[in-house]
Amino acid sequence: MTRSRPAGRPRLRAGLALLTLGLGTTLATAPAVVLSATAATTEASEVTADSGNLAWGFRESFRNYVGRQTAALPPVGPVPVGERITLVAPGQFDEAGTPAANLDTTPPNETLPYLLPVAGGTVTDADNLTVDTTGGAVYHFPSHAFTVTVENVSVVVDGGVGALVGDLAVEIPENNLGYEPGTYGGDDVVLGEVATTTVDVSADAVTVTGTGVTLTAQGATALQDFLAEGATLDSFTVSAELTAPAQEPEPWNPTVTLSAASDLDPEGETVTVTGSGFDPAANVNTSGRPPVAANAPTGVYVVFGAFGDPWRPSQGAASAARTVLDQKWALPEPSYSQVLADFPTVAGQLVLLAPDGTFTAELDAAPSDTATGTYGVYTYAAGGAPANAAQELGVPVTFAAPGGNPGGSDDIDLEVTVPEDDGGPGGPGDPGAFTWTVVGGPGAVSLGTAEAGAGALTATGDLKQVTVSDTRTGGPAWSISATATDFVATGASSGSSAGSTASSFPGSSLGWSPSVTANTGGAAAGPVVHAGTGSGLTAGATLVSAPTGHAPGSVTADAALDLRIPLDTPPGDYASVLTLTAVG
C-alpha cells in the first residue's frame, strides 16, 4: 500500500457493533432470538530492528556552518577538522549524501548526512506508524557557545501526518555572547513537521519519505533559538523490514444447529444435529473412567431430552435434572478409534468430532409421557472429564399438537370441557365457561435490536395479547402466569466471543410490566418483574388474574417486555421458552 498525503489534522475513526435480539415462546413455530456483533480490528506489525536506516542530515546548511567553522577564533576555536561534527554510535556518515564543499578533510567528510540504524517501531497501516532509530550526531562549536546533540530520531505518522521526534540536548558553556549557560532540550522532542509524507507499506516492509520538513516551535525552543521555528530541515527516507504480528489462534466458538426445532411430529421424528467450533482437546478424562482411556480427550454428549432449570453440570446440576431420551457421543481422535476397538457394541452411539471442531449426529426426538422440563437438544462434556461451561449448549424444541397441522394455521386450539347444560344459555342451569387464547396465534415475539446501556445490553418489546373470558357461575378465581427458561444459543451464526465461557445467558435477564384493557370481568394485571434482578421470570410470574366472586366478563392482558443482557454474552442466535399457564 502506498500513501502520499500532505500534512493535516489527524482523523478520528470509530466503529459500532449492534446486537440483534428476539424472544421465542412455547407458542412460537421457530427460534426467535438473534444476537450478533461485528467489530473491526487492525493488528500492528513490528518493525524489525537492524533491518534498515534513516537517511537524514538534520539541516544541510547547519552541517556546513558547524563543519566549516569559518567564523571560529582562538582561544575556543576553531575545533580541528574531523572533530567538529562527530557521530553517536551506531550512526554512520552517509557517503552517498551531499557534504559541504571545499572542506579539507580525510574521508568521510564530517559534513555528510547520516545513516541512523532502525531500532524498532510498529506499523498499523500507511496512515499510522512509528519507525524508531538509534545513533545520532554531535555539533561542536564552542566559539559560538554551543554543543548540540541530536539522536534517537523516530519517524512518526499519525492519521497520515508525518513528524520527526528525537532526543535533543543543547549545552551552552560560560560565554560572553549573552547566552544563559546550561543544558537545554530533552527527550522525545517533536523536531520537525512534514509537509508531504509518502508511505509504502507491504506485508513485510515499509518505506517512509518526508519532504518539506520544517523546525517546530518545540524544536526551536529546545535549540534556544539558534534556529528559528519554520527553518528548513533536511528531507528524509527510512526503510525497514516488518515482522508480522503473532497470529492468535482462532477462538473455539461452540455452535449447534438443528434440521428442525419447532412443530416436530408428536409421534417422533429424526433431527439432524450439526455442531461446529467444539475444541476437540477441551475435555480430558482426568478421572480414568472407561471407556475412554485415562487422560485422553472425551468429546461431548449430544442429547435429546427434557432438561430442568438449572441443568448444566458446571452449575452443579445433578444428573437427575437431565432426562435423556436419545443420545450420541461426539468423540475426537484418537479416542474415537480406541473406543470403537475396545467397545464395538457402542459403535451406533459414536460420531466423529473432527479436528476442526465439527460433528453431525442424528437423534430420535419424541416427547415422553413421564418427562418433565424443557425439550431440546443439549451438549455437555462427556464422561470422565470435568464440567466445561463453554460446551454446555442447548436448543429448545417444540412439538405440534396431536392431530394438528404443523406449518399450517397460526391459530391456537384451546380445549375446555363444559358440563352438560340443563337450561338455555344464561339460564338457571348455565354453568358458564372459562376460555383464553393468544391473539394472533403462534409465532415469534421480536425484541428488535439491543443497544448498549449502563452495565448491560438492553432490548424491549411487547408480549402477544392474551384474552380471557369467564362467565362461570360464582366467579371462581383464575390466573394466567408465565415462566421463562434461559436464553440458549441456536442457529448457524451462534457462538461465543474470545474469552467467553458459555453460549447462553440467564432467563432472569427478562422482565415485564403487565397491563389490562377491555376489562369487564374484574381482573387485575400482575406485578412488575424487573429484568436482571432476582430470578426475573424464571421463577414464574402472574400476567393477569381475577379473585373469587369476580363479575362475569372478559379482559385483554398484555405485557411490555424488558431484557437486560450481560455485556459479555457471546454473539450468536439465542432462544428462550416462555410458557403460559392458565389456572382456574
Image (spheres, rainbow, N blue to C red):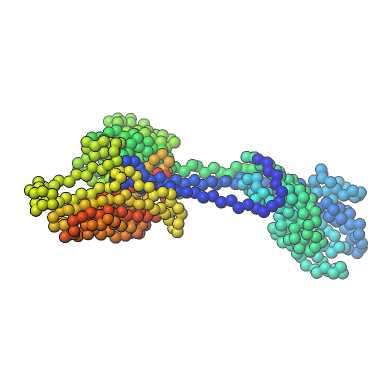
Q: Is residue 381 left or right of residue 177?
A: left
Find residue 407 and report its image quarter.
top left
Q: Image point 23% across, 35% down: which residue?
A: 267
Depicted 568 relative to depicted 222: above or below: above
Residue toward you, 258 or 166: 258
Residue toward you, 224 or 145: 224
Residue toward you, 359 or 148: 359
Q: In this view of the protein, can residue 285 be seen by the observer? A: no
Q: Image point 77% across, 61% down: which residue?
A: 220
Depicted 43 relative to depicted 458: above or below: above
Rendered-image quadrant of the N terminus: top right
Residue toward you, 538 or 45: 538
> Where residue 46 appears, x then y in whole percent?
62, 46
Find the residue positioned furthest to the left: 422
Q: In this view of the protein, can residue 491 be seen by the observer? A: yes
Depicted 98 relative to depicted 226: above or below: above
Q: How many marks?
A: 0
> Where residue 71 appears, x then y in whole percent?
91, 59
Q: Image point 16% across, 60% down: which residue?
A: 549
> Where residue 166 appears, x then y in whole percent?
72, 55
Q: Is residue 142 left or right of residue 303?
A: right
Q: Image point 22% across, 44% down: which residue?
A: 414
> Where residue 499 appears, x then y in whole percent?
45, 49
